[in-house]
Amino acid sequence: MPERTPYLAANWKMHKTVAEAGEFVDALLPRIAATQSDVVICPPTTALSAVVERRYGTAVKVAAQNMHEEDSGAFTGEVSASMLVELDVEAVVLGHSERRQLFGETDEALARKVPAALAAGLEPILCVGESEEARDAEQTDAVLERQLRADLAAVVGTKLAEVVIAYEPIWAIGTGRTATPEQAQEACAFIRGLVGAIDADAAAAVRILYGGSVKPANAAELFGLDDVDGGLVDGLGRLPQTHVQHGLLRERLRARRRRAPAAAGRRCAAPCPAAQAGC
């Protein structure tokens, strides 16, 4: 099983001016200088350049919060993958629940955006997750399968491992509610199984994040789960504290790699080649 580097991303949403972003990053970088995790900051578009300039020479990556699938055109208010690459941005958040709910982002659009990002050399952070109504109706698996099969439809199996998938239950975003470790593991294992149904090697390598009211108090437990490789943290002020725990997180990840391959609580989607091969 490949070693999956822990991945922690901070989505700033529509917060921080250029000056505020610079101050935050200047304070953050010394605190995470020794981290072995992938650290990703997702500032608003106006602050991308300021954050990129400050993170040169560090391990920190910068991600945009959205992009258009076309390289250019009459799309007022949008930015393209090539524009982001020109700024030395390395990744892009796609399909965040707020984009889906407030701005009408569709799975059809995401099916074009994800391969466009990959083609440009950007790392897509694809967000999926169910509403409270779907969770209560026991439709979580159905929602995740519909989203992932649609959003990744145009991604060839060998490229799947380059997509970072963030499981964000909508009912836990900004509400103070958090999925239990059992709920988070179950959903992320199901996601890994869906990837495995397409490409077993990609399933072992793809990084799956949990997002939704992650706090320093619960980060280590959530990030130590078998199929959770880190988090997409919406509370931007919590990122430094989370990274103080990166050593514990990494040791937990190493320890779980040494366990028997069939992790307790894993529910793979059927048919899953990885499961058929004795995963």
Image (spheres, grey):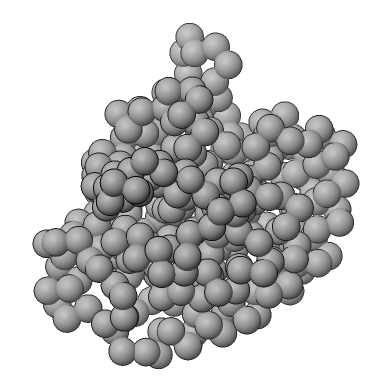
Q: Is residue 169 above or below residue 190?
A: above
- Residue toward you, 42 or 14: 14
Which residue occupies 74% across, 35% down? 15
Which residue occupies 40% across, 63% down? 183
Instruction: Please identify the quarter of the rendering in which residue 226 is found.
Output: bottom left
Which residue occupies 72% across, 44% down? 52
The x, y position of residue 154, in whole percent, is 25, 40
Which residue occupies 65% across, 37% down? 13
Residue 203 in view of the camera: yes
- Residue toward you, 180 or 273: 180
The x, y position of residue 84, in whole percent, is 58, 34
Residue 155 in view of the camera: no
Instruction: Please identify the quarter of the rendering in which residue 220 is found.
Output: bottom right
Q: Is residue 179 above or below residue 201?
A: above
Q: Is residue 229 above or below residue 172?
A: below
The x, y position of residue 125, in whole percent, is 48, 48
Q: Quadrant of the C terminus?
A: bottom left
Q: Residue furthest top?
A: 74
Instruction: Please identify the quarter of the rendering in which residue 42 is found.
Output: top right
Q: Is residue 218 above or below residue 259?
A: above
